[in-house]
């Protein structure tokens, strides 16, 4: 499977953060087919994210995935420590279930418990910061805009620690100095921010 053919699942938190800072185009630059599972898209209700989501779907660069079979949903709920009999299934469960149902899927999320679970299950996972760094590495985003976006994201999304911000700035600078590459997003170098 080439990088362009792989499935990439985008979590609502990442999409909302990029929308709030006017950088949804960075997600569009991710290599692969971008999807958002049905309940995840329903978490995006306020502007500008809802407007950006509708535009992305209309433009065809982000699809809405039908729910995976029930056995994957139940398996995901168990891995996330949820009671299968009593839980109202949320987006995290459906993201993980979709990743379990489609081998080779990459999950893009800033949700720490979901990222840890993906790593335990050997599911490729990336955060929004890794998406920025990879966009610079591929040459689709300049380092100045990436750094500005990083600091804007820190103000509107999950707060990043000072060390993660420094690491991300360093990785953006290093990515700008290397020849463009086509690499799957991975945030292992950034720790669990």
Image (cartoon, helix red, strand yellow):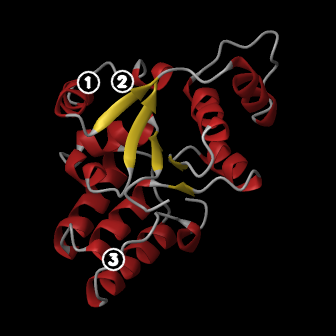
Q: Are marks 2 and 1 in contact (CB under 8 Å)?
A: yes
Q: Are marks 3 and 2 in contact (CB under 8 Å)?
A: no
Dot 1 corresponds to which residue? 50
Identify which residue, 190 or 41, lies in the foreground.
Answer: 41
Q: Quadrant of residue 12?
A: top left
Q: Residue at x 35, y 58 (%)?
A: 31
Q: Is residue 142 left or right of residue 42?
A: left
Going from the N terminus, do you reach mark 3 or mark 1 first? 1
Dot 3 corresponds to which residue? 172
Name the secondary structure under disc 2.
loop
Rendered position, 95 above or below 70: below
Name the secondary structure under disc 3.
helix
Q: Quadrant of the C terminus?
A: bottom right
Q: What is the spatial separation of the Cα atoms under label 2 and label 1, in whole angstroms? A: 6 Å
- The x, y position of residue 5, in whole percent, is 41, 53
Q: Which mark is residue 44?
A: 2
- The x, y position of residue 98, in whole percent, is 59, 33
Name the secondary structure under disc 1.
helix
Q: Residue at x 31, y 61 (%)?
A: 150
Q: Quadrant of residue 17?
A: top left
Q: Is residue 72 left or right of residue 18?
A: right
- The x, y position of residue 167, in whole percent, is 46, 76
Going from the N terminus, do you reach mark 3 or mark 2 first? 2
Q: What is the spatial separation of the Cα atoms under label 3 and label 1, in whole angstroms? A: 29 Å
Q: Is residue 107 left or right of residue 24?
A: right
Identify which residue, 20 or 139, lies in the foreground.
Answer: 139
């Amino acid at each position: 499977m080439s990088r362009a053919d792989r499935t990439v699942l985008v979590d609502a938190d990442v999409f909302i953060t990029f929308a709030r800072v006017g950088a949804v185009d960075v997600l569009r630059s991710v290599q692969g087919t971008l999807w958002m599972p049905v309940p995840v898209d329903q978490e995006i209700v306020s502007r500008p994210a809802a407007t950006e989501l509708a535009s992305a779907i209309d433009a065809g660069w982000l699809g809405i995935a039908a729910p995976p079979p029930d056995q994957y949903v139940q398996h995901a709920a168990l891995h996330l420590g949820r009671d299968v009999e009593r839980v109202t299934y949320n987006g995290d469960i459906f993201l993980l279930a979709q990743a379990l149902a489609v081998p080779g899927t990459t999950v893009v999320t800033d949700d720490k418990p979901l990222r840890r679970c993906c790593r335990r299950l050997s599911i490729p996972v990336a955060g929004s910061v890794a998406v920025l760094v990879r966009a610079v590495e591929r040459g689709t985003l300049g380092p100045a805009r990436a750094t500005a976006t990083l600091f804007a994201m820190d103000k509107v999304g999950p707060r990043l620690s000072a060390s993660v911000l420094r690491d991300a700035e360093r990785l953006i600078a290093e990515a700008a100095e290397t020849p463009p590459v086509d690499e799957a997003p991975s945030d292992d170098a950034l720790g669990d921010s």
